[in-house]
Amino acid sequence: MPEELTFELLSRDQQHSDYDWMNINYDGVRVGKVRGLMKGKTLMICSINIFPEFEGRGFARKTIEMFKKSFDIIIADRVRYTAVGFLGKNGI
C-alpha cells in the first residue's frame, strides 16, 4: 500500500482540454491519471484511471483521501458504471 503519492496538475493549455487533468505518481513513476473539473473548493470527478500494472495497490483510494482533504464538495459525474461502487465505498 502506498504511503505517499505525488500529484501533478496539468494546465488546460498543456492538455488542450476543457477538463482538468492530474497525473498520479508514485516513486517517480506515473501510475495513473484523473480527469475532472475544479472550481474553487469543488471538484467534479469524471474518471480516475490507475494503469493496469499498478491496480490493487491502493493508489485510487489514496487519491480519493487527498481529494477529501483538499475539496469541500466532491461530485462524481459521468463516471463508468463499474466505478460507482468504488466511489460509494470511499464516501463519494
Image (cartoon, helix red, strand yellow):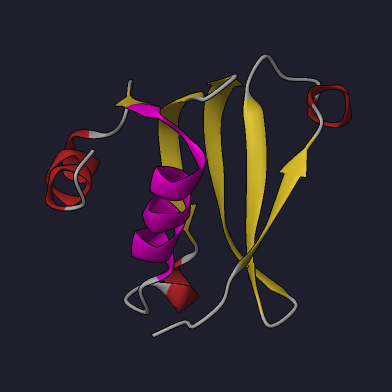
Image quadrant in which you'd find residue 78:
top left
Q: Nearer the viewer, residue 49 or 4?
A: 4
Residue in the picture at 33% in, 24% down: 75
Q: Is residue 58 above or below residue 49?
A: below
Q: Is residue 58 above or below residue 45?
A: below
**Residue 74, percent from left and from top:** 36, 29
Q: Is 47 located above or below residue 69 in the figure? A: above
Where does the N terminus fall, quadrant-wise?
bottom left
Residue under the image location 65 percent in, 28 percent down: 20
Q: Nearer the viewer, residue 40 or 32?
A: 40
Asked whether residue 88 is drawn in magenta, I would say: no
Q: At 37% across and 79% down in the image, what residue appears? A: 57
Taken as a whole, is the magenta stretch helix, strand or loop? Answer: helix
Left or right of 79 on screen, residue 71: right
Q: Residue furthest right?
A: 14
Q: Residue at left 19%, top 51%?
A: 86
Quarter of the figure with the C terminus: top left
Q: How many marks?
A: 0
Q: Position of residue 41 (x, y in %)?
A: 52, 25
Magenta-tinted stretch: 59-74
Q: Is 90 situated left or right of 72 in this image?
A: left
Q: Position of residue 50 (x, y in %)?
A: 46, 60
Verify whether residue 66 appears in magenta: yes
Q: Nearer the viewer, residue 92 or 60?
A: 92
Res. 52 image quadrant? bottom left
84 or 9: which is nearer to us? 9
The location of residue 51, given as percent across then percent down, is: 50, 64
